[in-house]
Image (tube, grey):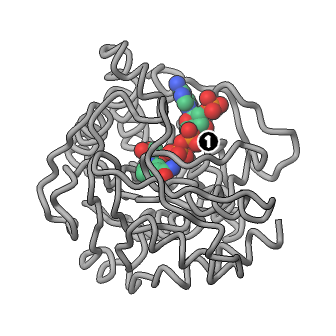
Amino acid sequence: MRVWLTGGTGFVGSNIVHAALAADHDVFTTTHSFTPPPRVGYGSDRVDMTDASAVSASVGQFNPDLVVHCAILNDFDRMYADRPGSWDAFVEATRHTASAAEDAGASFVLVSTDWVFDGTQGGADEETPPNPVNIYGVLKLASEMVALERGGAVARVSGVNGLHRARPDTPRHQDPGYGYFVASLVDAVRSGRKYRVWEAPNINMRATPSLAIQCGELILRIGAGRHTGIFHTCGADAVGRMELAHLACEVFDLDPAMVESGPVPPGQMLPAPVPYDTSLTTPRTAELLDHPPTPVRELLERFRDEYEAA
Ligand SMILES: NC(=O)c1ccc[n+]([C@@H]2O[C@H](COP(=O)([O-])OP(=O)(O)OC[C@H]3O[C@@H](n4cnc5c(N)ncnc54)[C@H](OP(=O)(O)O)[C@@H]3O)[C@@H](O)[C@H]2O)c1
């Protein structure tokens, strides 16, 4: 398959690239501020996702079977400070990539998020109507609508953990969500530092973790099957933050006494409400992709193997 994607130098996107190369697909990614080193096994060029004609020209030139839109303006402050620019970066960029896919006769997958739910909808499945509580969720939901109305697919990833394949030195910090949680814990405890698990009523306290490389594999499977509609490309188990921390200690053979609970440090909250319980279920995804979701322990074991090998 020929796979063209946006954001292949980001955390999730670099895992889509990695999964596609492992499956012998031809890959091309747009780049933005970071340029990957030459000879990495895939094509890349600087293309701004908000530039409709540049996106169209790049897709037309590569002639893909699958277009994945994974790039994101990953900056909450900017989303609030520049609403029109953020609308362009999320919704219009989705329109540009979906149109380019349509013109090329390629299938289209938008990468989305569990934060389209409001935090009271724990166990949401692919049919549950979303109800976002912050601008990021609103922009992702509007982007989802564009993708679906263009006959594309939406792959919601959640609590993504794993290796950053393009920029392994990217700092890994805990945040009010679940992304990078396990890597930041393992990094801290292995270097002898206690890890304080943030616990508070106004952060994401329950989610269904995913492993980035498996998200990539499932997204490719959606594209290869030319599926449409909504998919939850996450693991099987909803867990709380402390539960995930203790499980990570077991799997990575870390002393659980190095993990403690604490409040969110000053200055670390997002400038917006955060959904509390964003756990997902996957009945449609499991059936259409013939993929029973993977237990969180197995995802962590796979991550440990990747982490040790890196
Ligand atoms: N990480 C998670 O836990 C998580 C959870 C739920 C959903 N998601 C979804 O996963 C997707 C990827 O997120 P991520 O965590 O991998 O983000 P990320 O690491 O910040 O990567 C974002 C990518 O988008 C690129 N980009 C930014 N602005 C661009 C522009 N104007 N034109 C072209 N490319 C641009 C960035 O390039 P530069 O860095 O070079 O600027 C980078 O490659 C998003 O759709 C997000 O909603 C992630």
Q: How many marks?
A: 1
Q: Position of residue 150 (x, y in %)?
A: 25, 44
**Above or below for 100 versus 249:** above
- Asked which secondary structure carries label 1, the reply is helix
Q: Position of residue 298 (x, y in %)?
A: 55, 84
Q: Can residue 39 be seen?
A: yes
Q: Can residue 61 be seen?
A: no
Which residue is painted at 43% across and 64% down in the image? 241
Q: Position of residue 84 (x, y in %)?
A: 31, 14
Q: Amino acid at mark 1?
A: Phe
Image-based side of 226 in relation to 168, left or right: left
Q: Quadrant of residue 256?
A: bottom right
Front one among 20 and 252: 252
Image-based side of 133 in relation to 274, left or right: left
Front one among 206 and 212: 206
The quarter of the image holding the C terminus is bottom right
> According to the image, label 1 marks what residue?
62
